[in-house]
Amino acid sequence: MADCIFCKIVKGEIPCKKSEETEHFLAFHDIKPQAPAHILIIPKQHIARISELQNCHISLMGEMLLLAATIARQQGFEQDGYRLVLNCGENAGQEVFHIHLHLLAGRKFAWPPG
Ligand code: AMP
Ligand code: ZN
């Protein structure tokens, strides 16, 4: 997608503070962190939102969760815990329409979320 900011990050056209990169995913630090650690995990493939997922994406989404757990373990978040967030659509506050999994850690999170 030519005008997608996260596709531009994947292509290296916009800089990011990279955390991890795999064949199918890029993980980088959120530009406006909402916790001491706030990493975004995005598929390199452009998918606008969770509600557009199809059967062909099942293994990709499994890979995304596994990568989140791996990064959390490597970064030492496992013992205290962490939060994973997927915002979908307007009411959830989705701002960037390229699927991204928020990995937040380093503080206690409230429930229900705001
Ligand atoms: P969401 O509200 O779920 O769509 O979250 C989008 C996230 O992307 C927000 O937390 C933004 O701070 C973050 N974001 C937007 N642009 C950038 C960027 N260029 N680099 C890193 N994070 C970004
Ligand atoms: Zn995109």
Image: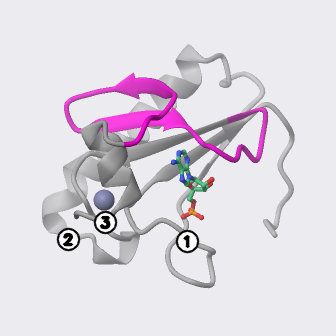
Q: Residue at x 83, y 49 (%)?
A: 109
Tell me the amino acid under the disc marked 2: Gln
The reply, left or right, for residue 15 in relation to residue 53 is right
Report whether the residue tagged 3 is closer than 8 Å to ligand 2.
no
Residue 107, how many percent across, how many down? 85, 36
Q: CA distance from mark 2 to mark 3?
A: 23 Å
Q: Residue at x 36, y 77 (%)?
A: 51
Q: Residue at x 25, y 59 (%)?
A: 46
Residue 35, how many percent across, how many down? 78, 41
Residue ranking furthest to the bottom: 91
Residue 30, how many percent across, how many down? 60, 42
- Closer to the eye: label 3 or 1: 3
Disc number placed over residue 3 in the picture, else none: 3
SS of the residue at dot 1? loop
- Residue position marked by numbered label 2 in the rendering: 54
SS of the residue at dot 2? loop
Whether 17 is among the magenta residues is: yes
| Quadrant of residue 23 within the rendered picture | top left
Report whether the residue tagged 1 is closer than 8 Å to ligand 1.
yes
Disc number placed over residue 35 in the picture, else none: none
Which is nearer the N-term, disc 2 or disc 1? 2
Q: CA distance from mark 3 to mark 1?
A: 16 Å
Which is nearer the N-term, disc 2 or disc 3? 3
Tell me the amino acid under the disc marked 1: Gln
Q: CA distance from mark 2 to mark 1?
A: 19 Å
| Numbered range of the magenta stretch | 14-37
The reply, left or right, for residue 31 in relation to residue 107 is left
Tell me the amino acid under the disc marked 3: Asp
Residue 20, how many percent across, how many down? 41, 24
- Residue position marked by numbered label 1 in the rendering: 94
The reply, left or right, for residue 43 in relation to residue 71 is left
**Looking at the image, residue 55 lies above or below residue 110:** below
